[in-house]
Amino acid sequence: MASQGRDNWLSARGLKTLVDPVCRAWRRVVLYGHSKTSQAWNPVTDEQFPSPLPTARVIPRAEHPISRASISDNALKVLYRLKNAGYQAYLVGGGVRDLFLGREPKDFDVATDAHPEDVRELFRNCRLIGRRFRLAHVHFGREIIEVATFRALHDPATSDDSDDVKIEDGRVLRDNVYGTVEEDAMRRDFTINSLYYNIADFSILDFADGMPDLESGVLRLIGDPEARYREDAVRMLRAVRFAAKLGFRIHDDTAKPIPDMAVTLEHIPQARLFEEVLKLLMAGQGVATYQLLRRYGLFRQLFPETEAALASEASMVPSWERFIMRSIENTDQRVSEGKPVTPAFLFAALLWPAIMQRMDRGDEITEPLEPELLQEAVSDALVVQLQRVALPKRFSIPLREMLLLQPRLERPKGKRAKRLLGHPRFRAAYDFLLLRAEAGEVSDSLAKLWTDMQASGENRTAEGSMEDPPQRRRRRRRRRPGPEA
Ligand code: ATP
Ligand code: MG
C-alpha cells in the first residue's frame, strides 16, 4: 500500500523514473550494510539488482576541490558531532555548490538522518523551528547552521489521504515526514543544489547528475518542471535567482513552463515573497536578476502596477526603465562596496513609476508634484502592492516619508529648504531625487542645487557658523543643589 502510494506520488511529480534506481540503491544499502567507502555504491558488485543499477555517483575527495578549510568551523563542528554520535551528516545545498564553484557560500546547510529532537540533544545552542517539518537551528553567535532531517518523498502535507500532523496525548506525531538521503535528494529543487558532501569520507554524493550541470553551468530542475513548479511556485524565482547569481543558463525544459506558470505565484504568501524579493534584488546581482524576472514574466506578478507603467511608457521622458535600472544598479554597487542597503529605498524606486502612473500627470510631468495628490497615490499604490508582496511597517513608513518629501525638494526656497537638510529622511529623499533627475523627471539643476546646498551646509557646520541651525540648543537647567550637597 505504502509503496503504491509512493509510486502515485512520484508519477504525479514526474519523479518516478528518476527515483526508482535510487531507491533500489537504498534497499541495497539496507540489505548489505553501508560500507564506509564509496565502493558500497559500486553497481558491479551486486547481482541482486540488475542494471541499470544505482545512479548515486560518488565523487571521492581526490576528485573534487572542496576542502574542509573552506567550510565554516561551526558547520564542521555540527557535522562532526553528528557523525561521532553515529548519524549520517552531509553538507548540502548552496554550501557545496558555491564551494565547488570557488565562491563564498551565503550559509551552510546540513542534512542528516538524526531527528530534530536528536539534534537538540547534541547541541545546547539549538532551537527547533517549524511545525509541519521541523528544522534544527544551531546557533553560534550570529552564525546559524540549519540542520534538516532527510525529508521523505511521500509528504503527508501534499498528499490527499493523510493528515499533516497528528496530536496524541499532546505529543506531535509526524508520520512519514522523514526519509532517506536518496529521497531527500529528489525533493530538492535543482540538480546543482542536490549534492551531498559526506563528512565521513569527504566524498560528494551526486544523486541527480548535478555535477555535470555544475561543470557546464546549467540550471536544471529535478523531475518534471511543471509538476515541481506546481508544488512550489517559488522555484521559478529561485531559477532566475541562481541563473543570475551564478551566470548559469536555465535549461530549456526548466525555463519553458515559467511564463505560463508565473501567475501561480499569486498563491504564495506575501511575507514569503518579500523574503524572496530581498534575495532577488538586494543580494548584489539585482540588475541581471531583474532582467530575467522581466523576461520570464515573473516581475509582473511581483510588481504588477510597475510592470504596467513600464509597458505603457509612451514618451521616453522620463524613462521608467532607466529609472528602475539605475536604482537597482545603485543597490548592486552599494552591496559590492559593503554599504548598507534598505528595502525602503528599493521598494520606493520600484513603486515610483506606478505612483506616477496613478497621478496621470501626462504632459505636466515636469511640473512640481502636488503634495496631497501624491499622498493619495502613494497610499493607493501601496495598498495594491501589499496584496502581492509584503513590506513590513519598518520599511513602508520611511518609504512613505521619503516620497512625501519629494514635493518639498522640488520647491527649494528660503529657510524651509535649509531646515529640510536636517530632516531625518533628507539624505534618502535627496538620493531619490538624484535618481529622478537621471531619468529626466526633474531637472539636473534642481539636483545640483541640493547637492551644493548640502555641501555649503556641511562646510558651514564644519566651521561652526551655520546661521540657521535646524534645532535650537536647549539651555541646560541648572540643578538646584540638593540637601546633601
Ligand atoms: P543560497 O543560500 O545561496 O541562497 P541555497 O541553494 O543554499 O542558496 P537555501 O534557500 O539556503 O538555498 O536552501 C538550501 C537548499 O534547500 C537548496 O540548495 C535546495 O537544495 C533546498 N531548497 C531550498 N528551497 C527549496 C525549494 N523551494 N524546493 C526544493 N528545494 C529547496
Ligand atoms: Mg543556503
Image (spheres, rainbow, N blue to C red):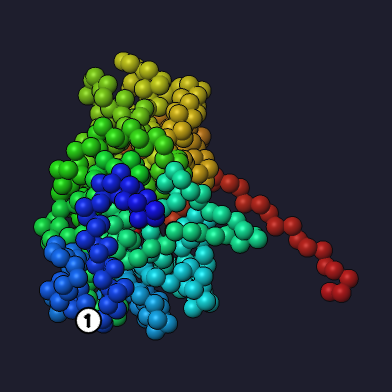
Question: Residue 289, how many percent across, how many down?
Answer: 25, 45
Residue 81 is situated, as x and y percent measured from the top left of the image, at: 41, 81
Front residue of 40 and 345: 40
Taking the spot 68% from the left edge, 54% from the top edge, the residue there is 475
Residue 216 in the figure: left or right of residue 75: left
Near-viewer residue (313 or 386)? 386
Reply above or below: 243 against 125.
above
Which residue, given by chain and number where applicable, does mark 1 sit on? 37
Question: How many numbered circles does the render carry?
Answer: 1
The amino acid beneath tag 1 is Thr
- Does residue 326 show up? no
Which residue is located at x 61 percent, y 62 percent? 171
Considering only vertical position in the picture, is 8 above or below 351? below
Would you identify the image quadrant in which residue 252 lies? top left
Circle 1 SS class? loop
Pick the front one: 466 or 79: 79
Q: Name, please, the residue furthest toward the bottom.
A: 84
88 horizontally vs 256: left or right: right
User: Where is residue 381, by image quadrant?
Assistant: top left
Corner quadrant of residue 87: bottom left
Looking at the image, can residue 75 be seen? yes
Q: How far across and down, in percent of the image, does residue 363 sit?
A: 31, 15
Q: Measuring 31% from the left and 25% from the top, which residue is drawn there? A: 308
Q: Residue at x 26, y 32 (%)?
A: 260
Which quadrant, please, contains the C terminus?
bottom right
Q: Horizontal placement of 333 versus 251: left or right?
A: right
Q: Residues within 10 Å of mark 1 (few under 14, many from 20)?
A: few
Image: 241 above or below 64:
above
**x and y percent of residue 326 in the render?**
26, 40
